[in-house]
Image (spheres, helix red, strand yellow):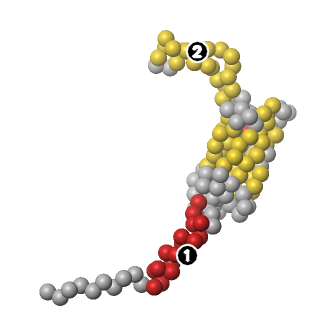
Amino acid sequence: MRPRRNRGVPAGAALLGVALLLLAGCGLGNGGRVPVRGKVTLYGEPVDGGVIVFLPATGAKVGGSPTGGPIENGSYSLAGRQGPLPGHYRVEIRWPKKTGRQIPVPGDAPNMTDETREAVPDKYNTRSTLTADVGPGGGTFDFNLQTK
């Protein structure tokens, strides 16, 4: 039986590996996602305890999936690896605002919880007309929600 020769790693593969490691250190290790942040108000009141979601707009050439995060004290911030890929997005905002009433916990009737109602009109969530064009560097997107 002949001893096996260790061929090692081809030079091209080694260079590719080093290049990928260097690129990951330059921020591309986040899959191309970029940071976004901004402020959200409803009728001039800061949204607190809501959620913002960036959905690739219909027909937009954006890879990846929807992304989003919490809105606290009227502000949101999605770091690079949580942010969207550059492209055109439809934005949905939800705010399950407390009504001040207590209701039974579903399936655990003796316990009570705060009742909430969606405070944001449909035109800003399920039928959202809000959009954001996210560039390669991310950006700031403020939403001042008003209705007629």
Q: Position of residue 85 (x, y in %)?
A: 64, 59
> Callout 1: few (<14), some (14-19), or many (20+) C-alpha neighbours within 10 Å?
few
Seen from the viewer's position, the closer of residues 107 and 10 is 10
> Callout 2: few (<14), some (14-19), or many (20+) C-alpha neighbours within 10 Å?
some
Residue drawn at x 67%, y 22% is: 98
Q: Position of residue 96 (x, y in %)?
A: 66, 29
Q: Residue furthest left?
A: 1
Residue drawn at x 71%, y 43% is: 76
Residue drawn at x 14%, y 86% is: 1
In the rendered image, the vertical position of residue 46 relative to residue 113, given as above or below? below
Circle on res. 84: none
**Quadrant of res 32:** bottom right
- Asked if residue 24 can be seen in this view, the reply is yes
Seen from the viewer's position, the closer of residues 123 and 27 is 27
- Say what secondary structure mark 1 lies in: helix
Left or right side of 77 for 66: left
Seen from the viewer's position, the closer of residues 13 and 108 is 13
Q: Position of residue 80 (x, y in %)?
A: 64, 55
Residue picked out by circle 1: 19
Residue picked out by circle 2: 103
- Say what secondary structure mark 2 lies in: strand
Left or right side of 92 for 23: left
In the rendered structure, which amino acid carries the disc numbered 2? Ile
**Quadrant of res 117:** top right
Q: Position of residue 116 (x, y in %)?
A: 64, 23
Mark 2 or mark 1: which comes first in sequence? 1
In the rendered structure, which amino acid carries the disc numbered 1? Ala
Q: Residue furthest top?
A: 110
Left or right side of 65 for 51: right
